[in-house]
Image (tube, rainbow, N blue to C red):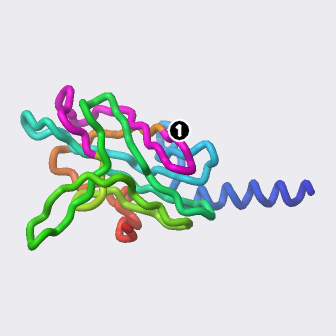
Amino acid sequence: MKRIKIFSTLAFVAIIGLSGCQSTSHNMPNCEMSKHKKIMVLKPWARASAGMAKAGAAFMLIKNHTIHNDKLISASANVSERTELHTHLNENGIMKMRKVEHINLPKYEQVALKPGGFHIMFINLNNPLKEGDKFPVALEFKKAGKIEVQVEVKTAGAMGDKHSMEGMHKMH
């Protein structure tokens, strides 16, 4: 029985290592996991506000390592009056942003929240988002529960870095 427990622990450590959840130079993980350690949120970031913009958005990569489909059902943050889940849609050649009720997270898949796709929208910002700042966002998953992440604010025109964009082509 002890061998099985050791093997399970080693397998979990290997999965985490392969999935991009390593320590950074500050000895803090570059991802957050649910209490079940099956949903991972990697490199959450937002763009700095342009001028007096009253809206902002956050992006990240979410990995579902569970045997069940899950859903991101809400997000909350104290940086704005409202926080919503959004996507971009092409309607007759015109890109439009729309609120969505949830974002599906298929089992054993990853979903990208990225510019031009799914994202977390901050409506009526309390203050402009400033490059270099960080702020907490609570993500609520239907099955996995809540995960709080620290969102790092990047430049106004940021598209994310190479590591935060890895695998983002698998958007569902």
Outermost residue on the bottom side: it is 92
SS at badge 1: loop
**Residue for point 13% across, 64% down:** 95
Give left or right: position of 42 versus 91: right
Highlighted magenta segment, given as a residue range? 121-147
Residue 139 is a magenta residue: yes
**Residue for point 9% across, 67% down:** 94
Q: Quadrant of the C terminus?
A: bottom left
Q: Position of residue 9 (x, y in %)?
A: 75, 54
Quadrant in the rendering for residue 129: top left
The residue that mark 1 highlights is 27
Q: Position of residue 28 (x, y in %)?
A: 51, 38
What amino acid type should be assigned to the residue bearing mark 1?
Answer: Asn
**Residue for point 20% across, 32% down:** 125
Q: Quadrant of the N terminus?
A: bottom right
Give left or right: position of 15 versus 62: right
Q: Position of residue 123 (x, y in %)?
A: 21, 38
Give left or right: position of 103 versus 94: right
- Whether 148 is drawn above or below 105: the answer is above
Quadrant in the rendering for residue 134: top left
**Residue for point 40% across, 44% down:** 74
